[in-house]
Amino acid sequence: MMENKTKKYDFGEKKTENINGKECPVWQSPKYLEAKKKVIETLESEQYKNILSESDFWILVNTYANKTKAMYSGLIISHNGCLKINDSLKNKVNPNCFHIEKDGYNNSLVVSYVDDEICEFGEVSKDNCKNDYPYAMAYKRCFDRVVLKKCKLAYSGIYSDSEAEEFKERPDEQAENAKDKKAEKKKEEDYRKLLIAYCKEKNIDMNKVAKDYEMTGRKLSNDDYFDVLCDLGWSDK
């Protein structure tokens, strides 16, 4: 008799997550555990098992306890995942049910959707949307919210990646981008001025430093000054 093996889904779970350059222990919230259970049921269901895959979802990671711990607080589905779900629904999203509202709060752009079962909205403002396609984003947010309600995923802590800018990146991508931003910040710093200030603060003879590192008579790059600073014991932490 063949053993029936069920695929194990973990959505990229880790024991630690990188928070601001520091590896922090992970706590899985009850909301995340509920979302995980619901998504696994959906992936294994007859309706979606050949339509959705684990790669359509990733973990929503938040910080708590003074940013010393990482919290798994839900699951995020891609917009493409929402499109695939809608394509398989009997009662699909009706394009005729979308409307642009004239009176958006605080000058926000609002798209509404109303049918016989669902009333939903998608909002965009300068504070929650950084791209140049606000109408498309407002529609996308509204569309995804309607789809997630129609398939019942919305009730179990599953969000669309259109909900917020940071949702578009998986945790490993966020960590990598944080490293890139730190490197970019390093380039922007004026390390020549920092070197002079550091030597003054630590009573280090700047003339001796210039001689020891053969700084006189040649043009140094910002990275050169950074290397000298590090050799002298300076740290940006």
Image (tube, helix red, strand yellow):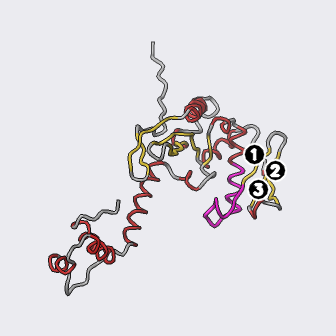
Which residue in the protein does label 1 denote?
93
Q: What residue occupies the far top of the structure in this picture? A: 1
Q: Quadrant of the C terminus?
A: bottom left
Q: Could you say where residue 104 lies in the image, as x and y percent from the top left?
A: 78, 60
In the image, residue 140 sits, relative to residue 44, either above or below, namely: below
Residue that carries the numbered disc 3 in the rendered image? 111
Between the residue at mark 2 and the residue at mark 1, the CA separation in whole angstroms equals 8 Å
View extreme (right): residue? 116
Q: CA distance from mark 3 to mark 1?
A: 14 Å
Type of the residue with mark 2:
Cys
Residue at 50% in and 45% down: 63
Q: Count residues near mark 2 (Cα–Cα under 10 Å), then give few for <14, some for 14-19, many for 20+.
A: few
In the rendered view, does 203 fall on the left or right side of 165? left
**Kind of residue sitting beneath label 1:** Val
Position of the N terminus by quadrant: top left
| Residue 131 part of the magenta segment | yes
Instruction: Please say if 139 is above or below 93.
Output: below
Left or right of 151, for residue 6: left
Q: Which residues are magenta?
A: 123-143
